[in-house]
Amino acid sequence: MGYLKIVTAILIWSSLGIFIRKIDLPNQCIIFSTATIAGTLQFILLASTGLFKKVKRSEGPSRGAIFLVLSPLCFIANTMLFYFAFRNTTIANAVLTHYTAPVFVALLAPILLKERIHKTTWIAIALSSAGLWLILGGGAPEPGTTQGNREHLGILAGALSGLAYAFLILIIRRIAPLYSSLFITFIQNGIVAIVLLPFVFRIPIPMEALPYLVTMGVLHSTVAPLLYVQGFRSVKANEAAILGYFEPVGAILLALIFFREVPGKIALLGGALILYSGYMILKARLK
């Protein structure tokens, strides 16, 4: 049952690019709206279950509070870049370049968490860099044209979103033992909504966008994270990480079905190198 919950969560996340393409709103407005909807729903869950009273406090609460604030800022950077990638390059390119995150985590963990760096990390960095280079060269139109420049910017944004997501993962690792996952997600959504409010309060939301925004707030930002966390009760962390590779596969298939986007062979090869570099990182951590 745990495996089914994790795979369901991953497949929900794999449809994110479809929703972003369907919503005719600025990215910051989409992020604000989904964070507000998800945050409201999570507040109701926390209040109704009494989990607010059970929030764990760390030995150094001020340090935990700092990371609670940093987490949503990294989330905003990650999401803005990821959504930009969805709008300016293919969904396959956006998702595959986003999967540079495990490599960035392996590179940053020794600095931020004092974890030991594996020799495999350097090979993985080389492979992911080669993969990104192939996608830039083979997954986009000729540079110098308007479409080509947008494609390249989208691909680079996808990789930078992987970097922002790596920082987010490392921060959550620091605060996960201090607070419940639902509380962390609620605080994250609340701060995201507050930070983005000055940039979106004058932007009207068309009625046709509401079903997509509500679905994203409920499914992508609440149900999927809860299923993923619940799945960890019976699934090992390394197994969940491997199951995570269903996301790019699902995203590519959905892009093919909804938008007839067929990734080029060179772009797929580059994506395969990026995914394999992440697998190498995971395998090295298990030894």
Image (spheres, rainbow, N blue to C red):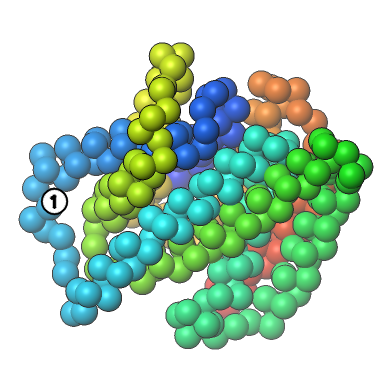
Pick the front one: 69 or 46: 69
Judged left or right of residue 59, residue 267 is right
Mark 1 surroundings within 10 Å by alpha-carbon count, few (fewer than 14), some (14 through 19), many (20 or more): some
Q: Nearer the viewer, residue 118 or 1?
A: 118
Q: Amino acid at mark 1?
A: Leu
- Indicate the quadrant containing the N terminus: top left, top right, bottom left or bottom right: top left
Residue 49 lies in quadrant: top left
Which residue matches tag 1? 51
Q: How far across and how far down the image is residue 4, in percent?
A: 45, 40
Residue at the image point whose x is 12% and y is 52% from the top: 52
Left or right: where 246 falls relative to 172: right
- The answer, for residue 215, to whether it is visible in the render is no
Could you tell me which secondary element the residue under label 1 belongs to? helix
Q: How many numbered circles are shown? A: 1
Q: Is residue 251 left or right of residue 236?
A: right
Quarter of the C terminus within the rendering? bottom right
